[in-house]
Image (tube, rainbow, N blue to C red):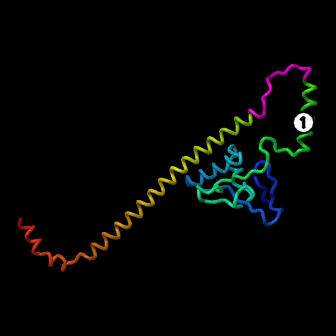
Amino acid sequence: MPVCCVIGCKNTSNLGKEIKFYNLPKGKHAFHRNRRSLWLSAIGRTEWPEERQKNAVICSAHFISGRPSMDYTHPDFTPSVFAEDKENPLPRKEKSKSVKRKALHNSKSSNFPNKRPAVHSKEKDLEVSTAPKDQFDDLNTQYTRLHADWLNLRDEVTQLKLENQQLREKQESFSFKSVAACNNKLIFFLLS
């Protein structure tokens, strides 16, 4: 039973046919590796080992059009719809329980000195969330450059094919009769 691997998403295949699931991009080419890295960065799973990535799926709810696109300029090139609160994905009732437990714990431990300073979770989350964004931007820039190079090479191949075709046509039209018609000029050229 497929379960969406996006943090906080609870979509499963039991919900019906309106939800579809898509595997993470696979492949050995740079395009697919970069696309997979972009997807993992977008869903916050950059540290996943290869084994976890093999069976991971993302549901259609995380794409604007409901499905991924292969066009890098399309917004659905990577998953971008995340309705859950990434800062604290707990439901409201669980949030209040967690706040009460934390307050109770703090009141009990206030009699004891802290061995180490407390780390504010918002600052920690901010630090963690900036690294994947930078990586995402770098990969996106690299992909854009590679795609532009590919387009230029494709245009160059098209021009070379056209030039090749024109040369073949010119070669086919060249015959002994065309040389004989210009024979006087050719002889004059050879004698000079």
The relative height of residue 79 versus residue 117 in the rendered view (above or below) is below
Apparent side of residue 151 relative to residue 184 in the rendered image (left or right): right
At x 35%, y 70%, the residue is 165
Is 48 within the magenta? no
Quadrant in the picture for residue 23:
bottom right
Q: Position of residue 88 (x, y in %)?
A: 81, 41
Residue for badge 1: 99
- What is the secondary structure assignment of the residue under circle 1? helix
Q: Position of residue 150 (x, y in %)?
A: 48, 56
At x 68%, y 44%, the residue is 46
Could you tell me the amino acid type at mark 1?
A: Val
Query: Which residues are drawn in magenta?
Result: 110-123
Apparent side of residue 122 relative to residue 186 in the rendered image (left or right): right
Quadrant in the picture for residue 47:
top right
The relative height of residue 131 versus residue 20 in the rendered view (above or below) is above
Q: Quadrant of the N terminus?
A: bottom right
Q: How many marks?
A: 1
At x 7%, y 70%, the residue is 188
Apparent side of residue 23 relative to residue 156 in the rendered image (left or right): right
Q: Quadrant of the C terminus?
A: bottom left
What secondary structure is the stretch in magenta mostly built from?
loop
